[in-house]
Amino acid sequence: MRPYNIEVQINKNLFKARHLDAIYKQLKTKSFQLENKGNASIQQLLNHEAWVRLFAVLEPLISRQVGKIKAHQELLSNVLNLPLKSDMANIAQLVVDTQEKIDALEEQLWPLSDVRQQTILNEKINKIEAELGDIREMLAKVVHSLNEGKDMKNGAE
């Protein structure tokens, strides 16, 4: 297969006169109609054995032509800045790969989160125990004061 030098010249007045959305919708509609007609024709031809044998012989030529059409489609999509099916498939694969990586990272973070929560819980428990120690000391002082007051009262009697 030899390389082709394709030069595309764009009539800028065409783009000024029409919106790209309208051109894209028209191109999309026509391509779907052409695809449906082609599929219907192929289905009719597949019903005849002679045509099937002919297409088996012509398959290499047809596959080359399909390759050329795909190359032209890519050039046209680059000019019109339209994504191809392969671009969309690549994006979808990237999304799936990214989601899998995020899931793997989340699985690695869960144990760390559990350790962090346990650390926070231990810090709260230590703080509560320290406050309880302070309360015990205060209660001990109050009890001691009450005992001293009781002893003084007993001594005065």
Image (cartoon, helix red, strand yellow):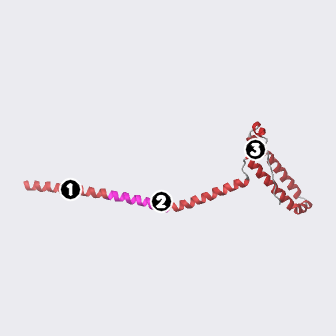
> Which residue is tagged 3?
24
**Circle 3 Cα neighbour tier, 10 Å, few/some/many (<14 / 14–19 / ≥20):** few
Q: Is residue 113 left or right of residue 19?
A: left
Q: Which stretch did the figure color magenta?
A: 111-129
State the image coordinates of residue 106 (x, y, percent, origin top left): 54, 59
Q: Give how far apart the Cα atoms at labels 2 and 1 are.
A: 42 Å
**Residue for point 84% across, 52% down:** 38
Q: Residue furthest top?
A: 17
| Residue 157, visible in the rendered structure | no
Q: Earlier in the sequence, mark 2 or mark 3?
A: 3
Question: Which residue is tagged 1?
Answer: 141
Q: Is residue 116 magenta?
A: yes
What residue does disc 2 label?
113
Amino acid type indicated by mark 1: Lys
Q: Residue at point 87% right, 53% down? A: 41
Instruction: Report the residue at 41% width, 60% height from top.
Output: 119
Gap between marks 2 and 3 measured at Cα: 50 Å
